[in-house]
Amino acid sequence: MDIKGIITSERIAEIRSARKLNRDHSYSAACSVIGINAVSELDNLLSLYDESIYILFSELYDHGIGGFYYSVSARDTDGFLPDLESTKQILNSITTLGLRDDERLLADLLPTEIANRIVNFTLSLQAPDGYFYHPQWGKQITEVRKQKDVVWANSLLKSFSQTPIYPTPPEHWRNNNDCPDFLSSIDNFKKHLSNIDLSKTPTNVASRLNANSAQIKNAGAQYVEELKRWLSSWRWLWLWQESENYDSINALIKICEVYDIMDIILPYQEVILEAAIRGIERENAADVLYCDNPWKSINGLFKFLRANNAREEIYRLRSRLWRRAENLIRKTRDNVLIFKRNDGGFSYTPKGSTSRSQGALVAVPNTCESDINATLVASSSTVNNLCAALGIPRTEIFCEEDGDLFFELLKSKISK
């Protein structure tokens, strides 16, 4: 089916009108919280996103394989194939972008033929050791890449009420005592932590801790307490570095997630809030995470305060955000705009997409293009975290009419 018969100027005009009405409803509720000037800046931010985002996503779907590519260069270049992370991220975006506002299983939203293809694609990648290996990458991949693909695969299959063929880690190592060496004993774990310097490469260290946090928790309370002791030994006041910077802010959100999984109370709340605000106000963002992570870290902070029923403290801290909301939203838009590409999507760096994800080659190097991960960070993740941090209703980027068009575009791929 020719998509020109699906995408017409009349239909796009109708969709944009419906989208505006949807957004205006959210703006009305937000105005009493952050003020009309801040709402105007929010509308300016939302103006950066249009239907070209999900049109691009639909064009990255490969029905013959049953998955989505990471970028256009990957789709159009021999040696690259769809991957689990990109596939699940796009499917997640159906609700995070507002294409559909319910939590129904993907099996109920997608055409049966597409749903079956995605499930078969996922299962085809699993090996007897429980991990999921992509043919374009082989088995010589980083440990973080391996673990993340298990998470993506399990999440995909669960969305379609399916299960893996073989037991997956960490279930596999729990059942067979095949755990990582650093968790084989508490002494080994202590030695492992003592060799980590959080001040030098905080984001990389925090990412590894985040990837292993479930295994650490499953190892037992003694391991959790040791991790808590180690985390508490670092100088939170300077966010693990002599000079606070974006890397330390990016690491903060990963550490917040570790605290969440471990059920540990997050310390130094006021310091975290001010550091995140400074992160939003900085200029010259080096990668797209700088747009989202400060807002995400603020949400992590408020989540812990809510868990401890600290409502007055939440109000006091959030009031600081409200007073500065107009400028913070404007700064966020300025940063997001740095990464906007001509196809309507967003790139990971100001010059283009990053060609590797956890060590695996996902796009042609040095290509000025958007990619799935960066587009969702710059759009739904940034906007949703911003709204949540400010305590205003979530402003949906898209609406049901956008979703109708997206699903029609996907269906058109079946007949190709």
Image: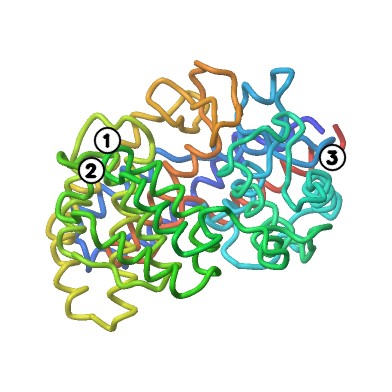
CA distance separating discs 2 and 1: 6 Å
Sort mark 3 into few (<14), some (14-19) or many (20+) by Cα contacts within 10 Å: some
First of labels 3, 1 by sequence position: 1
Sort mark 1 into few (<14), some (14-19) or many (20+) by Cα contacts within 10 Å: some
Amino acid type shown at disc 1: Asp
Residue underneath mark 3: 414
Q: Quadrant where the N terminus lies?
A: top right
Amino acid type shown at disc 3: Ile
Viewer-proximal residue among 213 and 252:
213
Q: Quadrant where the C terminus lies?
A: top right
Q: Residue furthest bottom?
A: 309
Residue underneath mark 2: 330
CA distance separating discs 2 and 3: 42 Å
First of labels 2, 3 by sequence position: 2
Q: Which secondary structure lies at badge 1?
A: helix
Residue 100 is situated, as x and y percent measured from the top left of the image, at 60, 59
Are the residues at dot 2 and dot 1 in contact (C-beta closer than 8 Å)?
Answer: yes
Q: Residue sitting at 28 percent across and 68 percent down?
A: 266
Amino acid type shown at disc 2: Arg
Residue 97 is situated, as x and y percent measured from the top left of the image, at 52, 52
Sort mark 2 into few (<14), some (14-19) or many (20+) by Cα contacts within 10 Å: some
Q: Is 320 located above or below residue 194 in the figure?
A: below
Q: Indicate left or right for 372 with 413 as reference.
A: left
Are the residues at dot 2 and dot 3 in contact (C-beta closer than 8 Å)?
Answer: no
| Residue 52 seen by the camera | no
Q: Residue sitting at 53 percent across and 63 percent down?
A: 214
Residue underneath mark 1: 334
Q: Which secondary structure lies at badge 2?
A: helix
Q: Indicate left or right for 276 with 94 as reference.
A: left
